[in-house]
Image (tube, rainbow, N blue to C red):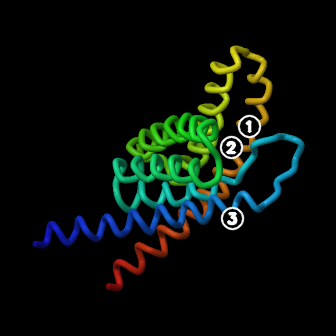
Amino acid sequence: MRKKRLTTQKIAQCGLLTAVMLVLGFIESLIPITVGVPGIKLGLSNGVLLFALYMMDAPTAFVLMVLKVILSGLLFGGVSAMMYAFAGGLLSMMGMILLKKMNFSILAVSMAGGVLHNVGQVLLAMIILQTSQLLYYMAILLFVGLACGAITGIAARATISHMKKLNRKS
């Protein structure tokens, strides 16, 4: 009976985290970031994936990433958006899982996730468009990925720290 309850609890947590990612993605789409470079986003939902990676486990975080890509694509984007989001999400998640296993700080893991997400998307675009010209664009996106990853990492670190304190009290 105990195992079933934990499974039900985990499913409920995943549903809640998926909903939070979708809401954050929608809010993020309303924030106009106009710096002359298209496609730049803060990556707020990456904070939820970091939370899942550190407070739950890597397979759960991976499933949440896939759910976010599919549901966000269906609600806000399309097949093309899903392809790019999955390419970035896959590379980002693999890198974050690896760096977490190597005991890097959550801030470093988040920053690497931001960079790798952009790398995955640009690599897919280079394959689809059959051009290496996008490497120039990647230079800008690497810096942006570091900065946005740092912001997300700081927020995730604070949330995780607070949640661990709450868990100790109960």
Q: Residues within 10 Å of mark 1 (few under 14, many from 20)?
A: many
The location of residue 76, given as percent across then percent down, is: 64, 53
Q: Are discs 1 and 2 less than 8 Å apart at CB?
A: yes
| Residue 141, numbered circle | 1
Residue at mark 3: 27
Local secondary structure at mark 1 = helix
Quote the CA–CA distance across marks 1 and 2. 6 Å
Quote the CA–CA distance across marks 3 and 2. 19 Å
Examine the rendering and report whether any part of residue 135 can be seen: yes
Q: Mark 3 or mark 2, which is nearer to you?
A: 3
Report whether 143 appears left or right of 15. right
Q: Quadrant of the N terminus?
A: bottom left
Instruction: Determine the residue positioned at 55% across, 69% down.
Output: 158
Instruction: Determine the residue positioned at 41% across, 65% down.
Output: 15
Inspect the image, locate mark 1, and give the three-letter code of the amino acid beneath it: Leu
Judging depth in this view, the residue of 78 and 164 nearest the camera is 78
Judging depth in this view, the residue of 167 and 28 nearest the camera is 28
**On screen, 89 above or below 162?**
above
Q: Residues within 10 Å of mark 3 (few under 14, many from 20)?
A: few
The location of residue 117, given as percent across then percent down, is: 60, 39
Inspect the image, locate mark 3, and give the three-letter code of the amino acid beneath it: Ile
**On screen, 156 above or below 57?**
below
